[in-house]
Image: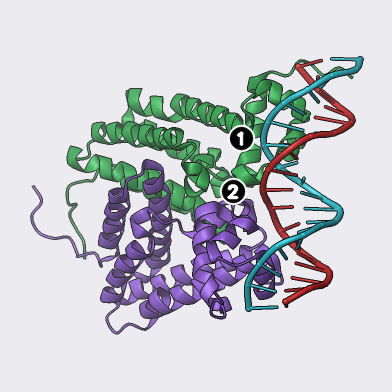
Chain colours: A purple, B green, C red, D cyan
DNA sequence: GTCTATAGATCGATAGAC
DNA sequence: GTCTATCGATCTATAGAC
């Protein structure tokens, strides 16, 4: 059964999921071959650089996806508050409430960090930067927005770790809900507290 | 040169650091042999179960260390506020301001999670539980303490991820400082805000 | 208790037929 | 473009000398 010509880009989601599930060292070429349905020869046809090239392509794809669905909306939204809210629902869905690992975060904790350091740094730097701008435009004091953005982006990563370790997706969702609440502009001291 | 008799427990810190730096798959037996200065035969003498047994021993050692230096103080302190403050300085030191990976967190993101799931869950569950108690005794509303404890424990894990990816230990320290501030009991709405 | 030697499997990567 | 066959290296684990 002659399979339709595989496109390199069509492989990226499968590669991404394989690296997410098994990590860089754990994702062997045989495993990747099984997951993609391709032989090693074909894989090296698409990625002459081998496994490292596959990861780099996946990281580039991830950055493109986040740029389109998260970073750009944060930067360009007419309604920054809505864009921030949308970010939380988007990443909750993307990370499957913590059931799905963040590949960038996982690689950052592994010894592959040194090899792919630039891509990892870029991902988080772009995220923090875009979120910082949106937080400022939503009314947070400018001198606090970078710290708050780091708290939120880091908090999401920590939520993935904790929810996976505890095996409790509800924990992921609750933490993100709390982070979302902190992203709202602080009201100036409301009236009645007991 | 007859080396003094190696004690199994003396190997654990070296094993822990090796797994932290290279991950479960990345830490090969040859690497471990080099790091410990022992041959493979000796390693299998101490750990007949091989690499998996080494990780289990390391995880048990980590839990013991945190029990003694973090969990128990949180549970038993006469001054819970001081115990919480001490926790933040202890873990900042332990994680080397984010330069050092949390092995439990890193394993939780890897596919080794399924194999060591119980130990990973225990570590975080004990931490959240001990911190929840201390937060309650320090004056937080009881119905919010578990959520706050999860925010903090998860926040620390996220700080490791983010600080390592950005290569900025200051970010780790700043996030922990922010988490520490949130652990203080909320004052009831103070007087003058502009 | 430590070592070397080595088994057997699997690794990443390549070659070449089709 | 896809495959099979295979290379040499490395892997986990074991055996046995000392």
Which residue corresponds to the image point at 61% horizontal and 35% vertical from the top-left? B16
Q: Quadrant of residue B150?
A: top left
Instruction: For mark 1, give the secondary structure.
Output: helix
Residue A192, above or below B19: below
Front residue of B38 and B193: B38
Task: Please give the name of the residue rendered at 44% of the width and 47% of the height, measured from the top-left corner.
Answer: B156
On residue B16, the disc is 1
Relative placement, left or right, of A149 versus C10 is left
Is A7 placed above or below A171 here?
below
Residue at the disc numbered 2 = B99
Q: What's the chain of the residue with tag 2? A: B
The mark total stands at 2
Residue B68 placed where, x, y %? Answer: 46, 24
Q: Which of B41/A190 is in front?
A: B41
Are there few (<14), some (14-19), or many (20+) residues within 10 Å of tag 2?
A: some
Relative to B117, residue A37 above or below: below
Task: Give the quarter of the image for residue A56.
Answer: bottom right
Q: Secondary structure at mark 2?
A: loop
């Amino acid at each position: 059964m002659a399979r339709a010509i595989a496109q390199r880009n069509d492989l990226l989601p499968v590669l991404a999921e394989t690296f997410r599930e098994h990590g860089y060292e754990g994702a062997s070429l045989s495993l990747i071959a099984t997951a993609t349905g391709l032989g090693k020869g074909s894989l090296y046809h698409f990625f002459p650089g081998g496994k490292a090239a596959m990861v780099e392509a996946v990281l580039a794809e991830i950055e493109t996806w986040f740029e389109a669905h998260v970073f750009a909306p944060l930067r360009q939204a007419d309604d920054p508050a809505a864009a921030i809210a949308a970010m939380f629902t988007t990443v909750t869905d993307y990370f499957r409430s913590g059931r799905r690992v963040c590949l960038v975060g996982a690689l950052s904790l592994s010894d592959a960090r040194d090899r792919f350091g630039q891509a990892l740094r870029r991902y988080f730097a772009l995220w923090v930067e875009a979120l910082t701008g949106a937080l400022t435009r939503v009314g947070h004091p400018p001198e606090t927005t970078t710290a708050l953005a780091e708290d939120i982006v880091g908090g999401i990563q920590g939520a993935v770790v904790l929810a996976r370790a505890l095996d409790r997706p509800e924990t992921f969702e609750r933490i993100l809900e709390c982070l979302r609440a902190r992203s709202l502009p602080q009201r100036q001291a409301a009236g009645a507290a007991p």
